[in-house]
Image: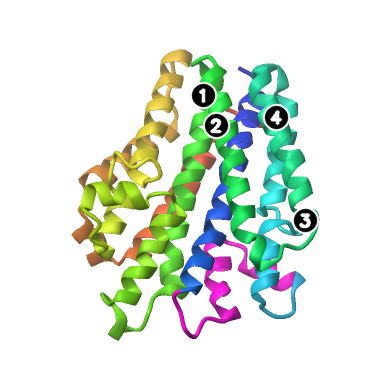
Amino acid sequence: MLGRTANGLYWMFRYIERAENTARLIDAGLRMSLTRSDSGDDDWDGVLQSAGVREDYDKVHPSLSGLDAVDYLLRDKANASSVMSCVEAARNNARMVRTALTRETWEAVNECWIELKQVLARKARSTDLPEIIDTIKRRAGLIRGAFHGTMLRDDIYNFARIGTFIERADNTARILDVKYYVLLPAISQVGSSLDNMQWESILRSVSAHRSYGWVYDGEYRPANIADFLILNPRMPRSLAFSYDKIVSNLGFLAQQYGETHAAHETASATLTLLQNRSMDDIMDQGLHEFIEEFIVQNNRLGQEISDGYRFYQ
């Protein structure tokens, strides 16, 4: 496969995943702010920090406002990672690799772009945000469903899946980090009903509330929730699950092309770390520090994949 085609597929699905996860990050901020009696605009500082756009936000807005922050994350053209920017970028990449996609996949992407262009044509009201977030998540799910139900399991499929799970791992880590940037309560509240409610909101924002209950009988303990989203290999948005799929799809590419790259070693080493690390080890290191280190490693893997498969040639 030409590097440009692989690049288009990889980034098409990274952008789709990023659009959905930006919506999930907003959802996490909204849910968590509802649990705080002293909630204010400053709460959104952590959401912007976790999205990696805090400095860019300051370049276009003189002060921090909750409505401006949400608008910046949803539809601002100045934000390359806004939901609308990501959907447009995904569609542009899909057009570039149109002949590598099934009709159903292309139509799902195009229909997503059309609907969100209408939904996000104007600044959203706070009362409309839950419905907007649900629309974004539903459209992303339809794209994945069309792709999984119609595509051959070949190198096209593998590059798309790798893009999906690298982005998903990054965003699950960032959603967890929201808790530490702005939503962590005072020391006196750790373990309280407020603290547990905030952790429960994190689960809901990644659609893991019910599945967590099946594993832990509904007991909301921060260490268990972090363990579920980081180390549980059965949870489809966890870091461990994502890296298991990345390693698997990279392995299929190695079989097909008859060669391995630095990315294979990095991905395998990260998966081994996630499989052998306990939650106690992570908490001893510091959850925030672990997440920061993971995000750096995940970004490194993305660059190694780009270099190894010559995405821009």
* 44 in the magenta segment: yes
Secondary structure found at label 1: helix
Q: Are the residues flagged by discs 2 and 1 in contact, CB closer than 8 Å?
A: yes
Identify the residue at image location x=62%, y=63%.
53
Q: Considering only order in the chain, which callout, 2 or 3, is on the residue closer to the N terminus?
A: 3
Q: CA distance from mark 2 to mark 4?
A: 13 Å
**Marks 2/1: CA–CA distance:** 6 Å
**Residue 94: image tag:** 4
Query: Quick check: 95 left or right of 220?
Result: right
Q: Is residue 139 visible?
A: yes
Tell me the element at label 3.
loop
* Chain part drawn in magenta: 35-59
Separation of disc 3 and disc 1 at Cα? Answer: 30 Å
Q: Residue at x 51, y 44 (%)?
A: 167
To which residue does mark 2 refer? 144
Q: Is residue 30 magenta?
A: no
